[in-house]
Amino acid sequence: MLRLMCVTAHPDDEAADFGGSLLLYRSRGVETCVVCLTPGQAGSHRGGAQSDHELAELRRKEFAASCQILKVSRAVILDYPDGKLHRQDLYRVVCDVTKLVREFRPHVMLASGPEGSLTGHTDHSMASVFATLAFEWAGRSNRYPDQLSDGTTPHRAQKLYYPTADATLPNRQPINLPPITAVINIGDYVETKIAAFKAHMSQQPLLSLFEGNLRQQGGVEKFHLIASATSGNIAMENDLFRGVVE
């Protein structure tokens, strides 16, 4: 079975950046996994939570509900601090993500770009760094060799993509988006993607912005191929699994 893994920073990123593709490829029989690095306890929108702990528990439940709507095969939330990923020990975080890559063994990985996606969020940027290193290091026997026991072996994912767009959001810090190399038609899944975002009830003040931006995209998700196990020139793609060997 083909496998697809997303690495995100916060609950709701899975729906906002990757929801349509998660649905599309699950409908094609691809096993999917979302790894979220934080429970989102520092979110500006609190959903009635009286403390960071309450918000974390609320957003864990929302994440589970969203992933159920997106038919995600495996959903994992780690417990790193929201808003402080840039202050974490890089080697430790990459270790945790690498272990999950070696366990799930994805053929294709998705993660935010170092610009921080459309919002330019620092946590998104750091999730990109951690995921990109895990993509590269999971296949090397000299990285975290203590993980290589009880049948666990190095795993080399075949492709890594960052989400991108052809326009930025207004009134935000400047970002430099990666070029578009893949356009995935998610037209059949737009409404379900919106429903998955709506499952994040604490983040409802963002819904109109999210939905308006999504509908402007015309039923597609756009990506940049950042790395591939197969060398050669980049060609425009309409399938993230193009060229992948099962």
Image (cartoon, rainbow, N blue to C red):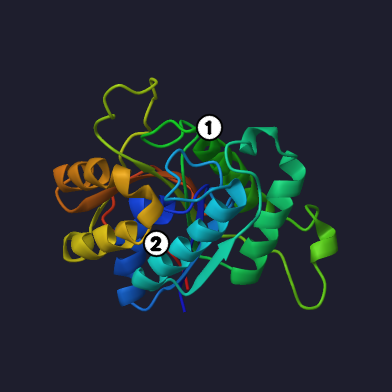
Q: Is residue 105 left or right of residue 163?
A: right
Reading the image, the residue beneath label 2 is 243
Q: Is residue 175 left or right of residue 154?
A: left
**Residue in the image at 18% along x and 43% along y:** 212
Tag nearer the camera, 1 or 2:
1
Q: Position of residue 130 (x, y in %)?
A: 62, 44
Residue type at mark 2 is: Gly
Q: Position of residue 228 (x, y in %)?
A: 49, 51
**Residue in the image at 16% along x and 60% along y:** 187
Q: Nearer the viewer, residue 154 or 190?
A: 190
Name the N-terminal-most of marks 1 and 2. 1
Question: Crowdedness of circle 2 by 10 Å Cα count: few (<14), some, many (20+)?
Answer: few
Q: Position of residue 78 (x, y in %)?
A: 63, 57
Q: Residue 84 sits in which quadrant? A: top right
Tell me if residue 11 can be seen: yes
Residue type at mark 1 is: Thr
